[in-house]
Amino acid sequence: MTDADLLHESAHAARLRRHIAARIAAAGGWLPFDEYMQCALYEPGLGYYSAGARKLGAAGDFTTAPEMSVLFGRCLARHCAAVLEATGDGDVFELGAGSGRLAFDVLMAMQAMGCPPWRYLILEVSADLRERQQALLATLPGDLAARVSWVDEPPREPWRGALLANEVLDALPVECFVWRDGVLFERGVGVAQDGGSIDGRFIWSERPAPDSLRAEVERLGADAGTPWPQEDYASELCRRAGPWIGAVTSTMEQGVALFIDYGLPRREYYHPQRSGGTLRCHYRQRAHDDPFARPGMEDITAWVDFTRVAEAADEAGLEVLGFCTQAALLLGLGIESEVAAAGDERTRMQRAGEARRLMMPEEMGESFKAIALGRGCDAPLAGFLLQDLRGRL
């Protein structure tokens, strides 16, 4: 990173800090964490996903599966092809398309299979990522490039086909809580007293949990099946997930929504030994747990409670068709045959290494899960035939 880049980053972070500090002051000195996270990630022109920082790949803050290997997109193309065959053709609708690499690989693979979608729709909230996507997808063969379009909201008209969301749920703003001496507190954000009212440091600030949050935490504890540790147990929850899933699938009249992310079923997510929660930040390929270090210049995420995703499916009139690890999903979708099909030994060895990164437990294979939510679609989903973890939800 050049000196000019560092100066730009510092100035950008300062603008967002002033904006958030003003929000905190207007709210009486305390802001719920989910509102802080919403500002830090999505504030127009200032938030991480609204600004121009490079996010993906080796030069960015984190690397996603599509950036690691073409194998990921080729496997998901097989999934999409099966869904479109079951729905009588249709569309692919991707949420948060990152650099556009997944869309590129899926479209090229579906074209090679002779079953490109009618449309490939992309909903992207980041202006700079949308530009990157448009630049990459413009290099597709003309007939494929013409199928791609960007939307600012889920389709209003009924559609059918496959919805893809890779590493999207983890970026939904979360509420944070902590147990101290048997009392439940909501964790929010304040400004350090020694920092002044505008440019000061942001700090964790706690208040007794309101009734609605207490009721939700008690429900989660009952579902998890173990009493909450009553001292210094911090975690988070995402009540926005249900309405969001309902909104993005509301007009899918027939099809399958596939969500892939790191996360756990509820009983494992809120295990007594997981006392620090799952909130993580990503900056220049390094992970840390201070969400106040560089607001607007780094990603903030939390693991996904996949039981909540299943609950959202019920509320939205969707059926949970499958739940498994990413490793099982990719094996079921033929990643081994994709490796074997490489044209030469050097490429085959490279692909084999990429496959290991995608599937090994110490890499992405176990921590990442896949869940399929369907409506009016009973297609056999090959990605979920090798492993069925729905009983753990």
Image: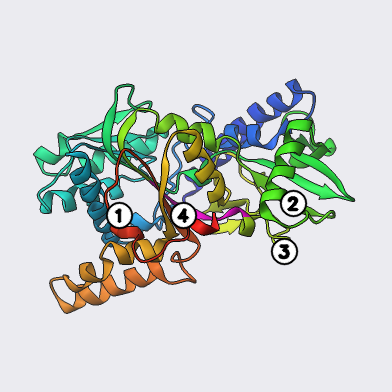
Q: Looking at the image, which residue is at 54% across and 38% down?
A: 241
* Marks 2/3: CA–CA distance: 11 Å
Q: Amino acid at mark 3?
A: Gln
Neighbourhood count class around disc 2 (C-alpha, 10 Å): few under 14, some 14–19, many 20 upward = many
Amino acid beneath label 2: Ala
Q: In what element is the residue under mark 1?
A: loop
Residue 308 location, x and y as percent? 56, 44
Quadrant in the picture for residue 146: top left
Q: Nearer the viewer, mark 2 or mark 4?
A: 2
Q: In 3D space, how far apart are the residues under numbered discs 3 and 4 (Cα atoms)?
A: 27 Å
Residue under the image location 55 percent in, 49 percent down: 307
Residue at image point 54% right, 52% down: 283
What kind of colouring is applied to the model shown?
Answer: rainbow
Q: Secondary structure at mark 4?
A: loop
Left or right placement of residue 238 versus residue 391 in this view: right
The residue labelled by disc 3 is 273
Q: Is 260 placed above or below 119 here?
A: below
At label 1, counting other C-alpha atoms closer than 10 Å, the crowd grade (few under 14, some 14-19, many 20 or more) is some
